[in-house]
Image (cartoon, helix red, strand yellow):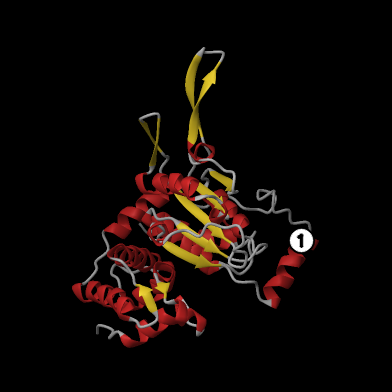
Amino acid sequence: MGNSREALIALRSEVGKAVVGNDAAVTGLIIALLCRGHVLLEGVPGVAKTLLVRALATALDLKNTRVQFTPDLMPGDVTGSIVYDPHKADFVFREGPVFTSLLIADEINRTPPKTQSALLEAMEERQVSIDGTPRPLPDPFIVIATQNPVEYEGTYPLPEAQLDRFLLKLTMPTPSREDEVGILARHAAGFDPRDLTAAGIRPVASKADLDEGRAAVQSLTVHEQVLAYIVDICRATRNSPAVRLGVSPRGATALLAASRAWAWLSGREYVTPDDVKALARPALRHRLELRPEAELEGATTDGVLDGVLAAVPVPR
């Protein structure tokens, strides 16, 4: 078990050969893979969201595909469709880009709800049904959907029920001055983001490490007081005066799963309240809907969660 943990932790430094200063986002993606969960990745254009996922796929030796979501994208463009093959004189199924291990759904909020729901069905069922035939997706299969937080014109924001399908929402901030200088130094030395092999990224973990890690995470001990602490945090969000829609029971199970994965990566055989606190914001921030008047007053979901974590008694 120790070997698989070390291999997955080594992913951080391997991805760091291509992406500077985003250890938290890499850790979040590793947690998502361990939990078989999907991720919303938010950041302004140009902060290396796609490069981060491609580097992680290379370091894990997993297939990755990128789909640019646009207003004219159809469900079949994502899932695949039945096409006529003149050589066989028959209709055959042509797989869409969803048949991969890491699917980058770029700017998911730019595509209409019909196409969004086709992808979200694949995320939930881990299969696509075309012409009445269910076709299983590979394992592992996770969707990393990116959103641009500044452009809302011509977008179709994901409804709350669909946001709830994502295990984590990770944010990629603009890099610090020091990190930005480091990024430019790499490019000046000839770094090409399209050629990750030349950047020195090699597979350091495998699907077997991931499978072993998943089994270990599932066997982690979670005491009743910690389960109650997770429930109390989620219930407190529903009672916050700034919140219109609080965290659902699905959100509580997501926080439990993510806390377990983080505890295992940290080398523990049990989950602590600090593990829960560490994952509360990424696991819950996209599940809260604030009241419009609270937003006008400057309230944020992270701010609400900070208040909840400060108020809910921590088990001893």
Q: Is residue 70 above or below residue 236?
A: above
Of all residues, the one furthest to the front in this rendering is 293
Q: Estimate the x, y position of residue 212 in percent, counting from the top left.
A: 35, 51
Residue 4: name its quadrant: bottom left
Q: Name the residue under label 1.
A: 187
Q: Where is residue 203 in the image (x, y as percent from the top left)?
A: 55, 49
**Image quadrant containing the C terminus:** bottom left
Q: Residue furthest left?
A: 224
Quarter of image, res 229: bottom left
The three-letter amino acid code for the residue at tag 1 is His
SS for tag 1?
Answer: helix
Residue at x 74%, y 63% (from the top left corner): 186
Closest to the observer: 273 or 48? 48
Q: Where is residue 110 in the image (x, y as percent from the top left)?
A: 57, 54
User: What residue is drawn where x is 47% and y is 65%?
Assistant: 169
In the foreground, 4 or 281: 281
Residue 237: give x, y in percent of width and height: 33, 77
Q: On the picture, is 199 further left or further right than 80?
A: right
Give the class, few, some or many, for how many residues have Cα within 10 Å of label 1's Cα (few <14, many ≥20): few
Q: Which residue is at 25% across, 83% downward?
A: 315
